[in-house]
Every structure is written in C-alpha cells, then in structure tokens.
Amino acid sequence: MKRFLLAGLAGALVLAACGDDTPASSTPAAITLVAYDSFPTKDTPLNAALDAFTADTGIVVNIATAGDTGTMVTKAVLTAGNPEGDVMWGVDNTLLSAAIDGMVFAGEPTQVDFGDVCVNYDIAWFAERSVPPPTTMDDLLLPEYRDLLVVQNPATSSPGLAFLMATIAHTGEDSWQQYWTDLRANGVEVVDSWDSAYYERFSGAAGSAGEKPLVVSYGSSPPAEVVFADPPRDDAPTGVVESTCFRQIEYAGVLRGTKHPDEAAQLAAFLLSEAFQEELPLTLFVYPANPSVALPEVFTKFAVVPTNPFTFDPATIAANRQQWQDKWTEIVLR
Amino acid sequence: MVGLALFYLWPLATLFTRVLQPGSVSDALSAPGLGRVLWFTFWQALASTALTMVVGFAPAYLLARFRFRGRSTLLALVTVPFMLPTVVVGAAFLALLPASWHGTARAVIVAHVFFNIAVVVRLVGAMWAVLPTNLTAAARTLGATPAQVLRFVVLPLLQPALWAAATVVFLFTFTSFGAAKLLGGTANPTLEVEIARRATQLGDVDGAAVLSLLQLVILGAVVWWSSRWQRRASLHLAAGGAARMARARHERRFVAFAGMLTALVMLVPLVVLMSRSFRLGGGWSLNAWRTLGSSEVRPGVSLGVDPLASLLTSLNFAVVAALISVVIGGLAALAITSARRHGSLLDIGLMLPLGTSAVTIGLGMLITFDTAPFDWRARWWLIPLGHALVATPFVVRALLPVLRSIPADQRAAAATLGASPLLAWLAVDVRRTLRPLAASAGLAAAISLGEFGATTFLTRAGRETMPIAIARLLGRAGEIPRAQGFALATILLVASGLIIGLASGATRADWGARADGE
C-alpha cells in the first residue's frame, strides 16, 4: 500500500512535470485546481464527477488544498501572476474583493455555490420548556432568551463574521453597536471557532455536551445532523431561525498567469455544469449555483433557504470588515 | 547547515524583503490592541512555564532516580501529549474542563502544563539521572535534612537543566497557537494567533511579518539570556548516578504515590479523548471505528476524508521527516561539537525555527520557491521538510551530549591499534551514536506525526496528514465525522506512544541529557 502511494505520488509529479513543459498542443495538459481545506481530494461523488471530466476531455485535474479560505486568498495574492494552480475554487464574498484587488483572477470569477449562516436552535430544548424558539433578530434581545445564544468571534471565524454582518444589515450601519451592547447585556457567549460553538457549547448537536440551545451555524446544519446521525434518524434535532440568515456566496475562476488557459477555462465551465453541481449539497453542504440542479430530499426537507437573506456586496465588505471587527471587539470583548 | 539556510533563512529573508515597506513597521507596532496581545502572550507564557516546572519536578525525579515496574510506560505516557496536535488535546480539554473555564487564560495554562511536562521530565530528568549520588549522600551524612539537600545540593546542581527546560517551555508557550486559539477563546489571543489572523484573515502580510520579526527578536533575546545563565551555572561533574529500586519505606511510598498521580494526570484527558470516539446517539457505539476504513460515511455520502489512508500518508511523511532531520541534525551536532566557540551560536540558530510562526515560514517558502528550477510549491516533500525543521532541534539535543562524551583517547587508541582515521571514526563515533540516532529518529517521526501548524500553511497536493484529517473531521456538523475524528486521534495517540516507547527503549540517553549546552 505504501509503495503504491509512493508510486502514485511519483506518477503525479511526473504528470505535473509533463504538464508544465508541454506547450499548448494536441494533448491536453494536466491542470491544478486550488481549493480550501474542506474540498475533498479523493473518493467523493464530487471527485468522481471530476474524473468523468477527465475521461471526456483528457484533462487531468490535480487538487491542491491551500488552507482555509483566508489563507488560500492570501497565498493567491502573494503569487498573483505566477499562481500555484490554474483554477481556484471557493473564494467567498467576504474575501472576493481582496482577491480581485490582488489581481488573482484572469477575467471575472463566477458564482459556483452559496450557503447561509443562520442562528440554529435545539428543537427539543424549547419543546421541553414550552418556550417558542426566537423568530427574529430582535427576539434575541428578549429576557426569555437570556444566556441562551453562543456566537463566534467575527475576527477569527467566518460564520462569526457573517452573523456580525447579518446584524449590521438588520439594524443599519448606525445602530448595530447598540444591538451588540444589548446582546452582550442579554448574555451572549462568544467563542473562537465554529467547532467549539457548535460541539462544545450548543445543546442541539448530536453528541454535544453543550447547554446553550441557540448557536450561529449554517442553514445546512440540520440536514447534516440527519445525514450523519448514528443511529440513523429521519427528523432533524435542530432548526433554523430563518430571519437571521446571512448569504455566503462562493466563487471560482481561472487564475491569472496559468500556463494552460484553454484547459483551465474548460474546467471552470465544468464546475458550473449539472454533473458537478448536483454533487455539491451532500459533499460540501452548500447549495449549487446552477438553478437547474435538483436538491436531494434531505435538503428540501430539513435545510432552510431563506427568501430574503441579509447580504452585502463584496466591495462593502472589503471596505468595512476591519473596522467592523475592531469595533465589535471593543464592544463585546472589552 | 545548508539545509537550515536554504529552507529557513532564505524563505524568511525573501518574505521580509518582499513585503516590508518603510511604513509597515510603525503601522504594525502602533496597531491598537497590540500591547494587550503582547502582555497576555508574555504573562501566560511565564505562568505556564512556572507551573510546568513545579508540576513536572516530582515526575522528573521519579523517572530519573528510580527503577520500577511500568517506568517506560509512564515515560511514554508523559511524552505523548507533547507530540499530539493541539486541536486534539484542545478538544479533550474542552470536554474535560468546566464550562466556566472555557475561553479563559486558566484553561490555556492548564493545557500548556499538560503539553510541556514532557520537556521538564526529559530535560531535568536527564541531568538528575547523572547527578552523583555520593554528593547527596555526603550531605545527608553531615546532617542535612532532605529539604536542605534539595535546597543546597540538588537544585544548584540541576540549575543548568532547569534553565534549559524553562527556556524550551517558555519558547513553546510563548508561540502557542492551537491551544491558545481553541481554549483561550476570543479575549486571549497570543502573538502567534494574531500573526496568523493578520496574514490569513486580513490579508495583512506585511503586518504579520513585522510581528513575527518582533516575536523572533523577543525569543532570541530570551534564549540568549538564558543560555548565559546556563553557562554560568554549569559544572563539570563525574557521572555517578544510577536509577535504582526504591528501598526505604518512604521511597516506596513516594514512588507509588507520585507514579500513580502522574499517570492519573496524564491519563484523564487522553481517556476522555478516546472515550469520545465511542459516543454516538447519546449511547456507546463502535460505529465510528467500523466506518473508519472507508471515506464513505453513508452509502453515497462521503466527506473525502479517508482516515486510514491519512494514517499511511502520515507514516510516509514521518519516515521522510525522520531521515531528513537525522541527517541535518546529525551534521549540525557534529558541527557544534567541533566548532567549540561558535557552536553555541549554531545551537541557538537551530532553535529559531521553533520560535518562528508557522504561517511566516509557509508564506516565505511559497514566494521563494516559485520559479523554475526551484518551483517546489505543492511538492509533497515540502511537508515532511517542514516537519523536519521543527524536529531537528530535538535531534541535535539528543546527539550533542553523546558526541561530547566520546573521549578522544578512544579514537587515539583505535589509531594506535592500526585503524585508519575512517575506521577509527566508524568504530568509535558511529558505533556509539547509532542508538541515540535511532532514538532521535523515532522522536522526529513522532513530532512529524503530530505536526499541525506548518502543515496547514503549506499547500498540499494529494492526501491529508492525520492531524489535518482529524481537524477536518472535527470541523464538520454531524455526529459520525466527529466521533471518527476522535477515533483517528486515538490512533494517532497510540502510534506516537508506540514510537516514543520504541525510541526510548533504543537508548537511555534521552533528548535532554547534558542539557547544559556546554
């Protein structure tokens, strides 16, 4: 097995080397898709779709994972013009401006998927106490929801930042600071990462030791709870507070400086095809950007796609992010 | 040496020259909140170091001075946490500590102590093991109480090792990333966390570079200052100590009590961690373990994380990293012993990668090795190489005392008996270093197995390493991936334990022996 792995590695290197040296000719080159850490490199239906692309076009697609999205974008900006790969997957709307200003892409990146960051609630917790779960952003300030919510630090966590932006979009640029002052007075708990919020503090996640019934997570977390439940279950233990959602959009594009622009363009187009997009929900737990793709049942049943999620355009986010984070830190952590 | 220059100094210099602009130093240093970050980083490191020294003292004595059943197991048990990725230990501590401790400095310090007891046990213990027993016996004969013996004989003699251990612990806790991020929560970022945040979340690479330079300067000063103290305190002693069975009743009691207490303190977080791989659906289940062999969690549903394949990847990397660090570390150790005066400079130089933030090294490599024929980005071997950078200082520490202890007259004797210089070197030096080399290779392999920081900042083609796979599994919603993450962490824990056990079985000269640096 080990020898096999080494042989595979050597093979990949040889392929990559061949790809580097071959000028655009009749044999398509091997190209590299740069992605964030949670993009699977092997064995998922998403990878099977990429293999089908290789079978059709002869273009071999290697996947390079570059860290979390922020790290990936930082690296792409540092290497702009002499990129680490040919196509990049997964720059979200909070970082898109940085990537564009850094002249990372050749041409316009396109939207490939989206998801929502929303307050999730523990259905059983509220049912046991006959308390209705909150339904609006302002409900979170009410005394009956005191000490129940756990959120992530927007300076260190991407869902944390999304929720901060949801509150800013909700209250307006002038009064969000008051909102957070009130939220703090109502006992909001702040942790550093999604993991610790969801698994250590939230009571609704299966197997969690937490005791807080409200958490900032994803609109697709309830179907994930169903899909990954053990023993299997057919109802979701958690729900989504629809009016608190912030829309995260992910983009992909050809990297400026690629040596294989034709192959890269073909791959970028394939990333939007139905064959690839229909595998997104159950692999990355995001929604396909291609509207003609049908969603799996567990998504239509348990996930929430809010009709009017909060959002900001990438330029607004880029211009204000640092200042929002600093202000927030002052209000909530000091 | 060339290795250090090529893969550490060059990338770092490239990064600094590329991103630093005239205004960036003053910009980064005048950023609001920096003072607070520095202050927290400093005092938590100081507190962690002090507490680790106190807590590690009894186990160090126990393991250095006594032979008892389960000694090597206990030694491995104390060492394993040091090798584990912080994400894993952090998750265990989150489960273990009361909720009111989450996100506090206390939690960070407790985890730091747990991580670094190994350093005290190894470094102080190694020196303690060779302290001549006749000195303490003489003091006792002259009427000193045990406390007086400790205060006036043992502690002064141990001073160089105490300084060395404190320095290493300070270095590790000052640059703490994973534990500080996971347990310290939002109110308590360390400098390292701030550097990573600037570089990866804000895209402020020049600010990050300034701060990482600042960190290097601070730590360089600390290491230099402490090595002066070490030298001042160092004594030349005839080795005269040996571990022995506990004889007197109070000794037997001490061995039993301290041994059990140490085992308990080390075991509890590890057991909590393991037990979580069996928690599913509110009950106990083996399903996480059963599904570990494939990446498919449910028919048609796959996260693309193949836990067992990541084990193989990690083992591969561990072998490569061990080879690299043994070669580099071995040569460095030879150079340090032969270059007597500048040796200590080299010694300090080799510690620097430990004090440099992983994100800076990663980004430096990215922009240094980016043009043919040096376009090495996303090459698989950059990852074991990064691991080797971290492991090399430990290899050097393991080899130095052995090389220094080889008396020149043995080589002379071999020559007199007709051996050529090469043969003499082979027969004397190589033969004597073979076992410590094997031991340090094991240590390097274990460090590589658990390395997380540098790996996350390097671009990877192909399979993930085990710590990365664990982080990905723990970072998903859903119960099975979570339990699988803990199952994989259990495997990592057992694997590092086995390697450490084998390595410490291979030799008794541990990686801190003669830690006085002279």
Image: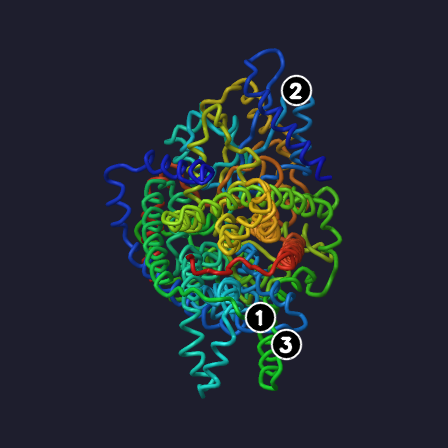
Q: Neighbour class for label 1 at 10 Å: few (<14), some, many (≥20)?
A: some
Q: CA–CA distance between discs 1 and 2?
A: 68 Å
In percent of width and height, residue B186 lies at: 41, 58
The answer to whether mark 3 and mark 1 are in CB contact below 8 A is no
The answer to whether mark 1 and mark 2 are in CB contact below 8 A is no
Residue at (50% x, 80% y) in the render = B137
Query: Which mark lies nearer to you, 1 or 2?
Result: 1
Q: Which residue is mark 1?
A: B242
**Amino acid type assigned to the residue bearing label 2 in the image:** Gly
Residue A319 is drawn in which quadrant? top left
Does residue A270 sit above or below B269 in this rendering?
Answer: above
Q: Neighbour class for label 2 at 10 Å: few (<14), some, many (≥20)?
A: some
Q: CA–CA distance between discs 2 and 3?
A: 70 Å
Residue nearer the viewer, B283 or B43: B43
- Residue B330 appears left or right of B41: right
**Amino acid type assigned to the residue bearing label 1 in the image:** Ala
Query: Which mark lies nearer to you, 2 or 3?
Result: 3
Q: Which residue is mark 3?
A: B245
Whether residue B356 is visible to the viewer of this picture, yes or no, is no
In percent of width and height, residue B463 lies at: 62, 39
Mark 1 vs mark 2: tell me if same chain.
no
Does residue B221 sit above or below A148 in this rendering?
Answer: above
**Amino acid type assigned to the residue bearing label 3 in the image:** Met
Asked which secondary structure carries label 2, the reply is: loop
Does residue B111 sit above or below B506 in this rendering?
Answer: below
